[in-house]
Image (tube, rainbow, N blue to C red):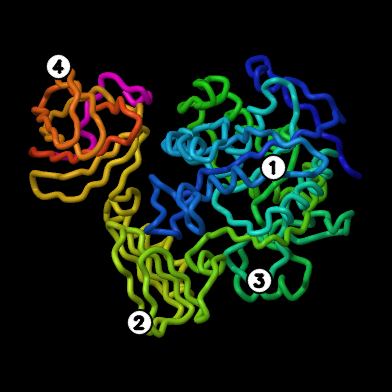
């Protein structure tokens, strides 16, 4: 029997987030919820901890995040889609996420997690945010780092899934498998429902190769896409029964958190009490069992879906030349077959006689791998972490709220950076204990604060910032400000920054 959505929980000290929702209340509002907290380590060296794959144009000019937030545009189903999605990301990616939204003309509510806690807490924060005004909504929860070729087919599947969600079921989209794949979770399908959907029998984590082959041959198992369609109240009801501690800690984190326009920052100390768990483990693995939390439905999705979880998956998702090769950037193939090569740093990458090879070049690292071992890159990144090498987390080009900098040269007592400041942006008012700086303007106009002085610099002009002097760099113009910074001193680390004022809350 289909269950109607249960009322959201109300508590004495969490009423803002858990106002009651009427049982059986009609719900025709779809809200895209983008889960953007992944690290994408298998796409190293392009994806790094501080700039993960969802912020990168892996298969197109737009970033994966931009492609995901615009995926519901043109939806023509029987439901109303909110123009403003909710994005849940790491707090450290807030400003990059905001910039990506501005670039594609999307206004979004961004929830910045103070720490990584996997997808179940992320979805819980989004559901609580939607219910804070007492109005329920159907969430279309999508990972930010997947690729879908046929958006119209996606819309059709979501429309079917939303019909089940409207009646209080948890619906998910399943991918009929084309091969035995050990990198994906699986969904065992149960009794047939309408429109090609099935009841969810059970969720299965990544199987061994022989088990995956059995699943595919049986025809009773679909890949788990990670896309869920469900009412906010349904999720909170299920989670409160399956994991009341996580539920309560998420409520407290939002209640004690802060708001700044469209940005929501959960309280770090309260969020630290939230356990880490995935949507699958926290709730979905309880679906289909006797006495389960609620009914579940899985809707087939045949739309050219890829989780882009490895370089092999990227190769699979892209157009290939007659020899099966994929090139990105300055790449030349000679006698190569079934290879993927990417030049990100601008250098020429030449592949001669290679077969099933991955080559990815960035400013500070080069990856060469057999395509069949692309899943092993996660272990490689762990080894780089063990060596405390910066290449595990950061690129040479580092994005900041005001623009970016690129460390183009360094030695024992010097470092040279190319700095680009966006129009209207400014760095913090700061000082350094161990280094002095020379600034040479290459393009644009700089407003410089140096001690008690404030002055403008134009192209080919320069200034010197002595060690220990308060200073600030601003771009008052309408074009990007570009300069070369030469640092000199006994210590040149990024932690030698004392901030006195900051427009981005980093003091």
Mark 4 neighbour class, 10 Å CA radius: few under 14, some 14 to 19, many 20 or more: few
Label 2 near label 4: C-beta < 8 Å? Answer: no
Range covered by the magenta-colored residues? 491-507
Compute the Cα span from label 3 to label 4.
Answer: 68 Å
- As drawn, the label of residue 352 is 2
Q: In which image quadrant can residue 139 be found?
A: top right
- How many marks on residues? 4
- As drawn, the label of residue 140 is 1
Name the residue carrying label 4. 453
Pick the residue in front: 500 or 381.
500
| Disc 1 element | strand
Compute the Cα span from label 3 to label 1.
Answer: 28 Å
Name the residue carrying label 3. 212
| Disc 3 element | helix
Compute the Cα span from label 2 to label 1.
Answer: 45 Å
**Which residue is outermost to the right?**
1
* 325 to 103, vertically: above or below: below
């Amino acid at each position: 029997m289909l269950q109607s959505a249960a009322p959201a929980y109300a508590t004495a000290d969490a009423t803002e987030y858990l106002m009651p929702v009427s049982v059986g209340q009609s719900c025709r509002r779809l809200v895209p919820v983008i889960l953007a907290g992944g690290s994408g380590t298998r796409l190293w060296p392009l994806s790094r901890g501080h700039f993960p794959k969802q912020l990168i144009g892996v298969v197109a000019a737009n970033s994966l995040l931009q492609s995901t937030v615009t995926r519901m545009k043109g939806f023509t189903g029987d439901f109303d889609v909110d123009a403003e999605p909710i994005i849940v990301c790491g707090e450290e990616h807030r400003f990059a996420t905001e910039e990506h939204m501005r670039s594609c003309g999307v206004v979004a509510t961004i929830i910045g997690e103070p720490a990584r806690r996997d997808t179940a807490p992320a979805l819980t924060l989004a559901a609580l945010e939607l219910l804070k005004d007492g109005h329920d909504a159907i969430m279309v929860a999508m990972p930010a780092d997947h690729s879908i070729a046929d958006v119209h087919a996606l819309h059709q599947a979501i429309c079917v899934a939303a019909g089940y969600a409207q009646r209080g079921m948890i619906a998910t989209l399943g991918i009929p498998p084309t091969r035995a794949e050990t990198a994906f979770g699986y969904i065992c399908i149960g009794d047939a429902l309408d429109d090609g959907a099935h009841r969810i029998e059970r969720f299965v984590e990544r199987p061994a190769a022989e088990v995956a082959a059995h699943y595919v041959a049986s025809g009773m198992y679909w890949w788990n896409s990670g896309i869920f369609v469900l009412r906010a109240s349904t999720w909170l009801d299920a989670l409160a029964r399956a994991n009341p501690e996580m539920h309560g800690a998420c409520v407290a984190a939002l209640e004690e958190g802060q708001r700044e326009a469209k940005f929501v920052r959960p309280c770090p100390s309260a969020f630290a009490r939230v356990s880490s768990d995935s949507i699958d483990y926290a709730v979905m693995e309880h679906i289909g069992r006797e006495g389960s939390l609620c009914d579940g439905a899985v809707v087939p999705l045949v739309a050219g879906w890829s989780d882009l979880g490895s370089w092999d998956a990227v190769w699979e998702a892209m157009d290939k030349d007659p020899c099966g090769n994929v090139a990105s950037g300055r790449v030349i193939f000679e006698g190569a077959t079934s290879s993927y090569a990417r030049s990100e740093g601008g250098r020429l990458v030449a592949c001669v006689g290679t077969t099933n090879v991955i080559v990815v070049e960035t400013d500070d690292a080069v990856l060469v791998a057999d395509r069949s071992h692309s899943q092993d890159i996660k272990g490689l990144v762990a080894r780089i972490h063990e060596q405390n090498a910066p290449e595990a987390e950061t690129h040479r080009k580092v994005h900041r709220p005001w623009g970016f900098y690129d460390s183009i040269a360094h030695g024992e007592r010097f470092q040279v950076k190319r700095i680009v400041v966006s129009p209207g942006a400014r760095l913090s008012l700061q000082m350094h204990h161990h280094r002095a700086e020379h600034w040479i303007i290459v393009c644009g106009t700089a407003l410089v604060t140096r001690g008690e002085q404030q002055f403008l610099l134009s192209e080919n002009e320069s200034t010197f910032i002595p060690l220990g002097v308060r200073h600030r760099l601003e771009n008052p113009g309408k074009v990007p400000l570009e300069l070369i910074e030469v640092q000199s001193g006994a210590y040149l680390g990024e932690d030698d920054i004392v901030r006195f004022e900051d427009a981005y809350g980093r003091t």
